[in-house]
Image (cartoon, grey):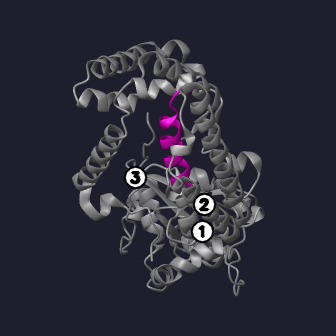
Amino acid sequence: MTPFPLPLAEIMGHWGQYVVYLLIGMAFGVALEVSGFANAPLPAAQFYFRNMTVLKVMFGAIVTAMVLVFFTAAIGLLDYSLVYVNETYLWPGIVGGLIMGVGFILGGYCPGTSVVGAAVGKIDGIIFVLGVLFGIFAFGETVGFYEAFWHSSYMGRFTIPEWLGLPYGVVVVGVVLMALFMFWGAEQLEHIFGGRDLSKEPKWRYYAGAGLLGLAVLTAIIGQPTTEQKWARIEATETARLDNREVQIHPAELALTMTDDTLRTIILDVRPEADFNLFHLQEARHAPLAVLPDMLDELRDTPENAVIVVVGNDEAAATEAWKFLRAESVRSTYILEGGLNNWIRTFGDEAFVADSSIAGAADDQLAFVFPAALGSKLAFAAPNDTLARSFSFTPKIVLEVKRGPGGGGCG
């Protein structure tokens, strides 16, 4: 079974996915209105510690979603690597958060709640939305003056577990404990500054908190799936593709892909460095299996027109690398059929092939002798498309739909 998130574009089509997004957005807006968040004094009251409903509801939703995301990932229902995580620009993010916070205090709305307020006809909500639009326009017209700062302190997809060097489950438990303490502290502030009678608060909130903490602890105990566990979940489907030769592409198809300006071709050469230096395809990257884990974020973040082709001397090492990439949800990944030995036999100069061929070369070993470390200097490292079109083959490359970024939160 393919784990979530669902590829809505594949299931419902280009426009169908937007219908789902619209319905979710409308439901979120209704929830904000029912919660009273479209009434500016309620969100603003949290900054005076009189009413902390916004903090408790929004942070409660965030923490609940966090626990469910990592619990479902732990049991194999969700592939967390396919969940979009906003890239971190540390200092611009801090400055932007401070600016938004000041606007929140002054206007009583965040961008999301202001839209709800405007939708139900509140004049202050409409004015706030107009202010947001003006701010967007002003930013777009002035960003050139501070663009270097805007793009500074880039950290990519950076998460708290990576920062602390701790397992995701441990961090989930820690965040839940922090949230429960915050909720308790928020109620104490409401009692002190807002005169709230805590004895009238519902008792079920304690059971809900305990249940959330219990689920977080269970998530930590189970742990996040390893690459081996991820592969086991998709092994039947992907092994069938391997056995049916659906992912092994002909050298001519790769050659044509390399010259196709509408595609971004990423060639990962998984061979030993000595073989790579002797000969490799033009623009190929040396990427032995040991370094592939460090490349995952980059490979997952490739554009929709990217094709990743793994090459070895034959197919054994390339197939292992392909399995790793598929288990880690890297899209549009293929194997060079017969490896570089087959590539050289297909495109190599006849005299070179005849003179340098090694009879009885071991499996997944380079079957040709090179006079020196020539890298990609030989002509057949990048054959022209006319030569490639002279071969008959069955095209196999199909671009997979990329999972798009998602939004969330009050903003």
Q: 39 or 136, which lies in front?
A: 39
Residue at 32%, 41% (x, y): give it: 34
- Few, some or many residues within 10 Å of mark 2 (<14, 14–19, 20+): many
Distance (Cα) linking label 1 and label 2 = 30 Å
Q: Is residue 50 magenta?
A: yes
Q: Amino acid at mark 1?
A: Ala
Q: 29 or 251, which lies in front?
A: 29
Find disc 2 in the rendering and name its residue.
268
Overall secondary structure of the magenta stretch?
helix
In the rendered image of this protein, does residue 219 appear above or below residue 127? below
Which of labels 2 and 3 is toward the front?
2
Q: Is residue 351 visible?
A: no
Q: Is residue 91 magenta?
A: no
Q: Earlier in the sequence, mark 1 or mark 2?
A: 1
Instruction: State the extent of the magenta-drawn residues as a range.
Output: 49-66
Q: Answer left or right for 332 relative to 270.
A: left
In the rendered image of this protein, does residue 13 appear above or below residue 41? below
Q: 234 or 274, which lies in front?
A: 234
Distance (Cα) linking label 2 and label 3 = 18 Å
Q: Secondary structure at mark 1?
A: helix
Q: Secondary structure at mark 2?
A: strand
Quadrant in which the C terminus appears: top left
Q: Earlier in the sequence, mark 1 or mark 3?
A: 1
Determine which of the numbered discs, if any, sits on residue 74 in the image: 1
In the rendered image of this protein, does residue 277 appear above or below residue 24? below
Q: Earlier in the sequence, mark 2 or mark 3?
A: 3
Q: Amino acid at mark 3?
A: Asp
Classify residue 221 by image quadrant. Answer: bottom right
> Residue 270 at x, y = what percent?
67, 65
Residue at 46%, 15% (x, y): give it: 106
Which of labels 1 and 3 is toward the front?
1
